[in-house]
Image: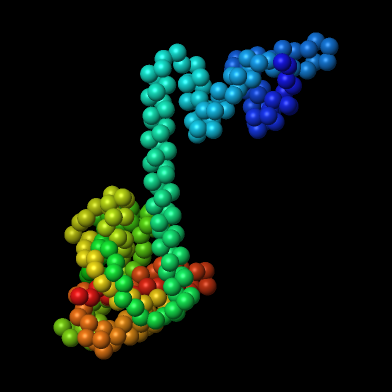
Amino acid sequence: MNILVGDLAKLFGISSQSLHYYEKIGILKPEKDIVNDYRYYNISDFSKLGALRKLRNADFSMYDSLDIFNSKNYNEVIDKYNQKKQELLEDIEKKQKVIEKLNYATHLYEKYNTYGSKIYIEQLPSFLRFESADTHIIFQNKKMKTEAMPWFISILHTFSCQMFYYNDCEKSSFSHFTHGMITDVDTAKYLNLKVTENVMHIDGGNFICCLFESGQDSNVVKSKIQQSLEFAKSNNIKIRGNPCAINIFSYQDKKFFNQILIPIF
């Protein structure tokens, strides 16, 4: 069985240069026809290339593929296989988390397309929120910058938000708001986010929710929160925490897609 370079390359879906590389490092040893100067690969080359492609298709690096290929110790091969399986499982978990966040965003967009800015009540999990309650600026010192980095690096899994604080016990006006980042507790555990004095825990349960679009005018956000608070008052719903405005996505034309969350009993 004699196979030309181009035919073997096409058969395994690789380049002729890759075959030349395997030849250069001594794995493939084609026979050269002295008449037409063609190089031909035999059944042994075919089998060797198949073994290497099997490892490369299993996502092993070229280095590890050659290491396994040249190994004479099955225990070493088993260790390499188990290590690769662990890497793949971790990658699957990472991709599954991405899918969960995309599903969550899709759910919110679909709900907004169907119901617009209609106020509704939904049961949600517990949240963690990173913030500084004394300032609008989240990076006011080196310590907070260090704490904030993991929250911003993982921004697909976390969301920027504003927390509004009441001016009085009647919850009729706001004294101030703070900037921060928020995510659910399970995601925080997955990301290994540290719980410090700057991290607030928001218990899961029922929340008044409202989806809406806004520009850079913060009064739009405040207006939506006030509408949500009036909804609670008119329906005799008791509030158990501060309102939070979450930025689901920011668009290039300075348009923001937001969600109001108000914890209720």
Rendered image quadrant of residue 245: bottom left
Quadrant of the image containing the N terminus: top right
Quadrant of residue 20 in the image? top right
Q: How is the image coloured?
A: rainbow
* Number of numbered markers: 0
- Extreme top residue here? 34
Location of residue 258 in the rendering, given as x and y in whole percent from the top left corner: 40, 73
Residue at 32 percent across and 50 percent down: it is 191
- Measured as percent of width and height from the top left, residue 228 is found at 31, 82
Asked whether the viewer can see residue 66, the reply is yes
Tell which of 192 and 208 is nearer to you.
Answer: 208
Nearer-the-camera pick, 27 or 236: 236
Residue displayed at 36% across by 77% down: 210
Location of residue 31 by image quarter: top right
Name the residue: 35% across, 80% down.
119
Q: Which residue extends farthest right?
A: 35
Q: In the image, is 20 to the left or to the right of 119? A: right
Say which quadrant the C terminus sits in: bottom left
Answer whether residue 222 is visible to the viewer in this image: no
Q: Residue furthest left?
A: 169
Q: Residue at x 51, y 19 (%)?
A: 69
Relative horizontal placement of residue 43, taking residue 125 as reference (left or right): right
Image spot of residue 243 (x, y percent): 27, 75
